[in-house]
Image (tube, coloured by chain):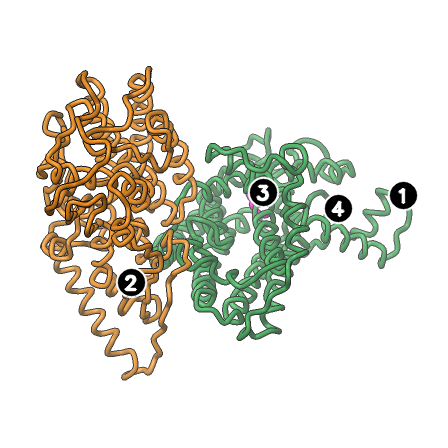
Amino acid sequence: MNAGVAMSGLLAVEVPYWATAIIKMGVIALVIPTAALVLGYVFLMKIMSFMQSRLGPMEAGPYGTLQLLADGLKFLQKEDIFPEKADRTVFALAPLVVLVSTFLIYVVIPTGPDAVVAQLDVGIFYALAVSSLSVVGILMAGWASANKYALMGGLRAAGQLIAYELPLVLAVMGVVIQAGTLDLQKIVTAQATGEIFGWDGIGNPFILTQFVGFFIFLVAVQAELTQPPFDMPVAESEIVGGYQVEYTGFRFLFFFMGEFGTAFAFAALAAVMFLGGWALPWGDLEHWAFNIVGPVIMLVKVMAVAALIFWFRFTYPRLREDQLQRLAWKFLIPLSLLNIVVTGVFKVIL
Amino acid sequence: MTAVGADRRQQLAYVATQAADARLNVEIETEGMTLNIGPQHPATHGTLRLVARLDGEQVVEAEPIMGYMHRGYEKLAEVRTYPQVTTLINRIDWLGSFANEVPFILAAEKLMEVEAPPRAQWIRTVLFELSRIANITLFLGDMAVQLGAITPVFMAFRDREFVLNQIEAVTGGRFHPNFDRIGGVKDDLPKGWIEDTKQAMEKIRDFCDEFEDLVLGNEIFQSRSRGIGIVPPAIGLSYGLSGANIRASGVDWDLRRDGHEALVYDQLDWKVWTHPDGDSFARYWVRLQETREATHMVDQLLDGLPAGPIMAKVPRIIKVPAGEAYAATENPLGEMGYYIVSKGDLVPFRVKIRSASFSNISITPWLLKGVYVPDIITILASLYFILGDIDR
């Protein structure tokens, strides 16, 4: 579906191609900082504080809602410091690479029948592929910092992210087999119009049949985001922040935005693939009103998944690097392969 | 795991170290990396420096370098009168301050041949145990945060507050009470304090139950701490480990029971906790049990508090007769002792402070061989040192 046509249908005016492109860029450029701000404020600052018998920020704005804006402004004012022996070009580029990989994921996330930047036939494949680009940025940051802690952090991140790409992709395979497509829009449609043993009251959100895949996906996402219990690459009590250790000011802000933006993106992917995405199982999916209701439905689901992701983060201690690899290769990958086999068998016989 | 298994494990670690050493520059010409952990590093919660030679992420050799926070207390004590010294030595182990004063006062009392009246001794023991709780609750949260779990440390700070409030209600100081005097204690307990303290002890017991579930019961915590940093009893004793560190290796030795100082532990019904494993998990477990045991001890002490004066007859200006005396008590971190040499002056001639953390940390070069970098943090956290207690 051409988004330009859809947009014009919605606004009842003809929008030229370049204008839709600019609108899309503007939306993406707005969505990512907003997503990072919302997750950072709601979970990192408030929910975490309540779990730890604290109040969190209370001064900047009502209930501290503007705290992250204030922090962002503070970061912008800081001096842009390069370590003396750093590889300056690579050091400066690394946060951008991480942030770009975050931006690219958002391109395919659907929030309505037409409210999507680009509807790709290989949507989920594309999203997982570009999300792993951030490894390159992290390795660059770790290497270019000319710092031993940063180097260890970068290497740990590389090992960890590569090990967890595999279960992440394999966990998604079950959904792909069931929906019969890689296209995220069609996965949403398949869930909304599906039926559970002949009953189509709530469609067929894949979390009911792919709960193993959902579990593996969440664990792998946790490792991709380098959050506890898999935060060895940044482990502040061991290697003092890892690859981030030499970054200050707005470059550090990029890493921060990248981290929370990616968390939001992965939560959105999980919502699309397992919780039914923007659609409701009732009503006409092609109706234009879903372009307005869809983002709201998505936001609710994304926040639910993000709450799960961050709950793990605040609860668990950190695994050791070798224990993490063992978990990935000896438990998650066999489990996800088994899941694929079972899904395939059911697909054939049902 | 038995002590025999522990020996075997350390032997294997040693072999691995030798192999790593041999490999370093000869065979595949990989270059070892020297990692300087500290003096500014979050895991040392103070200024301990650890120079670790690494092969990949495996430690070939690690050496702690102390003295970045040396404040010269032994020398400073020589120019202060006896009552003034307690203000100073409060700052050695800053988490359980009152416990620092007691052995010094006991040593001075030995020289002066005065004995505190029973009520003073009971109050002393209550505060001693309260400062133990204040100290170790923080350890229980701190080790979890070193292993990456951020929430327990906030809970530890929250519940430690109840104990600090009780200490403050008696002494006026939350961190540095300066309450112990030669011949007794400064003041009597305020009204209603006993009831409040019993309630606080109830909360600490809840805290211990919660942590037994939340931290000790966590699979990741167990897999990170079990079998890591095993101290065989003989090695531990030869390095002079004391306190919970040696009790976690199965050595049943506690100065509260086995010492000879004038505190009232012999009149209480309590138990010395030991653990046969000697690993980081065992050290955490023993400290958790000791905290709970301490709350029961405080309850018993408050029930049996005798009436009477809180101060023995001592002259207004304290001159300690010439002589030498040593007193040691089971402090939160381990054995802490003061050796005082007096020439009959207003000030001590020489004071030697035996602090627990200094000995506890000296085992690290032996212990850290062959472990991985994250395990350095686990081992350091489980040995539980206070920088002020190392450097004095």
| Residues marked 2 and 1, same chain | no
Return the residue at label 3: A271
What colour do you see for chain A?
Answer: green
Q: Determine the chain carrying the residue at label 4.
A: A
Q: Is residue B306 above or below residue B26?
A: above
Q: Determine the chain carrying the residue at label 1.
A: A
Return the residue at label 2: B64
Residue type indicated by callout 1: Ala
Q: Is residue A319 above or below residue B314?
A: below
Front position among marks 2 and 4: 2
Return the residue at label 1: A12
Q: Residues within 10 Å of mark 3 (few under 14, many from 20)?
A: many
Return the residue at label 4: A114
User: For the point 9% across and 55% down, which residue is it?
Assistant: B234
Which residues, given as a range, are shown in magenta? A269-274
Front position among marks 4 and 3: 3
Residue type indicated by callout 4: Asp
| Chain in orange colour | B
| Residues marked 3 and 1, same chain | yes
